[in-house]
Image (spheres, rainbow, N blue to C red):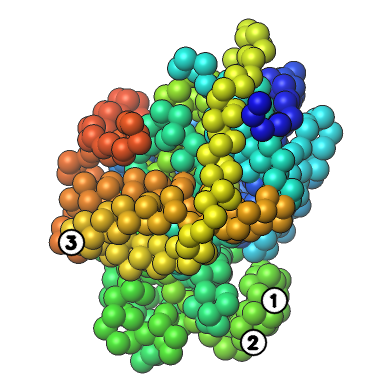
Amino acid sequence: MGEEYISHEYDVVIIGAGGAGLRAAIEAARSGAKTAIITKSLLGKAHTVMAEGGCAAALQNADPRDGWKVHFHDTMKGSKWLANWRMAEYHAKEAPDRVRELEQWGAVFDRTTKNVINQRNFGGHTFPRLAHVGDATGLELIRTLQERGIHEGIDMFTEYTVRHLLKEGDRVTGCVAYTRVDGEFHAFSAKSVVLATGGITRCWSVCSGSWEYTGDGHALALWAGAELRDMEFVQFHPTGMVWPPSVRGILVTEGVRGEGGRLTNSEGERFMFDYVPEMFAGDHADTIEESDQWVEEVVSGKIATVRRPPELLTRDVVSKAINSEVKAGRGSPHGGAFLDISHRGEAAILSKLPSMHHQFKELAGVDISKEPMEVGPTAHYVMGGVIVDAETQETTIPGLYACGEVASGLHGANRLGGNSLSDLIVFGKRAGEHSAKRATDLAQPGIDDGQVQSAIKEMVAPLERGEGENPGLIYDAMRDMMQEKVGIIRVKNELEEALEDLKDFSKREKACFPGTSRKYNSGWHQALDLKNMVDISIVATLAALTREESRGGHTRDDFPGHEDEYWGKTLNICWMEKGEVKIRQEPVEEMRDDLQGAIKEVKAMIAERAAKQGGGK
């Protein structure tokens, strides 16, 4: 007689209740599927709320020259030409409709004087493109989707952690979870399972992600036999809080720089002018002009000239620049740089960046309308994830879907700010729609008691060891090691050392002891999280060691980068075989002819615009 568990039956089970999970659930339920969301945390607690700056969509409200082709070009260019171009095309074409849909569902976006959605400038985007709600856009997106979801009849299982995917042959048929509060076990039969679990950034000690970001979905997919790609590409957001230690890593929205924030070093220099990459000198000539004018909105129907300060270069460039200034001894007192928005005045700051003002006042005792913030790079987002079909979001395992940050493809080697929120709603909708469509033709799968008991046995193993190391100590030590050896700048010998260290952490994880109770035992949750964190850290480190070049969010000090779209484009694909992570390299698929034409068209337009601005100086 095995452990007792409670059984459930659904057409579609969605793991995760952030923007992608909620949007998928709404679409699945609207399609007629009996739908459940299982979330590790509470509703409204998703990492989506950390996306403060805005949601990128070519609405053409701030500049009529924008359009899906320009957004597509910017996404591909930002990705260093590694993005899945089919996903980038769907995303650029569908994002405006998804944003307007949110507005119809009650999202209260900031408006222009003509009462259309206002759009702000952001790094890597040719035109102001980010629909925003002050600096709390992600929060408004979650609020709107939750409110909408309530009326769709979706069942919610909050504070449940999924530890195992059930399979029948090759296909996924459900999952096994436990309740975090009292340690009850639950088995879910599902015709389709959608992963919407977010990212992996808790694997680093300085990160913007909250405690849930332990790579659960990435690991579930890996263990179930799915393939992952691009896992070496981890985006270090240039601006996280660096002081006091209790808030280290908490995000400072790119919206601060979008609204005119200036980065300076300890000598008072705006150092970003020294780090403008050569690639921007041509088609982004306006970027490097020493100017502080940018478009806030279209006034009286006239479009102001867009001049972007170098603080709005792509995130990988700005992060590396801050890192270089600190290493050169020109950092701020606590090992970052200064970000100053005070010149905009208190009224503008309280109107445009209210949560940032509150965040610094409450957490750091800093009034950003009068003094600069101290900021530094923080592990923020993983571009890599589970490989999905661009159209349906199905993974390489039948019946298993993925959307949002846990899925890979859209962002390639580097994500543009604002693309994450539109990613959630574009591909959340697709995942929900196609997972429900698949479920219509299938009989309800049975729950295999043998698989459930085996999963439960793995879950309770740490509690039965009787003695061992405190899992919290292993957790902290591993995150510090990843920060040190697989951080923003990487070299071969440190990556090799990290892989050896991870073997050791894997042994320690298998021998840790969190006590014996299943009730309210945070040590037990941490002991289980360690398994995914070790495996996913191995994938990220192995991929980083295999990619012998610098590109986007992956910088190898021993292999300086090219900034040329034509240099060798390969993908690192990882999977698990008999408990061991394997890797292979594949060439990037050639882009469709009409999309290559669209890229050329946009490049010509940008070059013409730069020439006009150059001539008018």
Placement of 317 over or under 199, stated as above or below: below
The reply to whether residue 569 is in sight is yes
Residue at label 3? 493
Circle 1 residues within 10 Å: few <14, some 14–19, many ≥20: some
Real-space CA distance between mark 3 and mark 2, rounded to the nearest whole angstrom:
41 Å
Of residues 240 and 456, the one drawn nearer to the viewer in this rendering: 456
40 over 11 or under it: above or below: below
Numbered label attached to residue 365: 2
408, above or below 13, in the image = below
Q: Nearer the viewer, residue 496 or 115?
A: 496
Can residue 57 be seen in the rendering of this structure?
Answer: no
> Which of labels 3 and 2 is toward the front?
3
Q: Residue 200 appears at what percent x and percent y? A: 47, 51
Based on the displayed image, in which of its 4 quarters is residue 132 positioned?
Answer: bottom right
Q: How crowded is mark 2: few (under 14 residues within 10 Å), some or many (20 or more)?
A: few
Corner quadrant of residue 376: bottom left
Of the numbered discs 2 and 1, the one sitting upstream in the chain is: 1
Compared across the picture, whether 148 is left or right of 443 comes to right
Residue shown at 31%/52% (left/top)? 503
Q: Element type at marker 3?
A: helix
**Disc 2 versus disc 1: nearer the observer:** 2
Q: Residue at x 46, y 48 (%)?
A: 531
Residue 312 image offset from top left, x and y in percent: 43, 65
Which of the image's four quarters has the C terminus?
Answer: bottom left
Query: What number is the disc on residue 358?
Result: 1
